[in-house]
Image (spheres, helix red, strand yellow):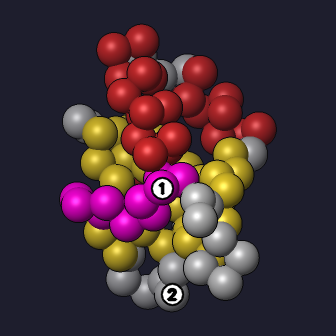
Amino acid sequence: MPYSVIVSKSVQKQIVQLPASVKLKIQEKILALKSEPRPSGALKLKGYDHQYRLRVGDYRIRYEIFDEELKIQVLQCKHRREVYRDKS
């Protein structure tokens, strides 16, 4: 059963501001999370129970998986130098 992926308005704004060359790749990766929430290359973040990150070039997608509810919440989509600064 596919997971539902929730992308908040703030994350949507982050994606819109990305360079065009990266934006499409990131959108594809986020959509792919519906069928495979832990794809190869996904890394569980230390210090968090359910948070993971995906690399897309120099950009990172931080997300949280709720297996009981089959839900994925995208937390951030930023350049690698910025994504880990704000602990949301």
Rendering coords of residue 39 (x, y %): 31, 60
| Quarter occupied by the N terminus | bottom right
- Tell me the element at label 2: loop
39 is within the stretch colored magenta? yes
**Mark 1 vs 2, N-terminal side:** 1
> 82 or 37: which is nearer to us?
37
**1 up-or-down from 35: above or below:** below
Circle 2 crowding by C-alpha within 10 Å: few under 14, some 14–19, many from 20: few
The residue sitting at the front extreme is: 1
- Residue holding disc 2: 49
Mark drawn on residue 35: 1
Q: Residue at x 41, y 41 (%)?
A: 29
Q: Is residue 31 left or right of residue 72?
A: left
The residue sitting at the top extreme is: 20
The three-letter code of the residue at mark 1 reads Ser
> 65 or 22: which is nearer to us?
65
The three-letter code of the residue at mark 2 reads Asp
- Figure quadrant of residue 17: top right
| Quarter occupied by the C terminus | bottom right
- Figure quadrant of residue 71: bottom right
The region drawn magenta spans 33-42
Q: Residue at x 29, y 39 (%)?
A: 56
Q: Nearer the viewer, mark 1 or mark 2?
A: 1
Q: Main secondary structure of the magenta part?
A: loop
> 39 or 45: which is nearer to us?
39
Rendering coords of residue 49 (x, y %): 51, 87
Q: Is residue 65 left or right of residue 54?
A: right
Rendering coords of residue 35 (x, y %): 48, 55
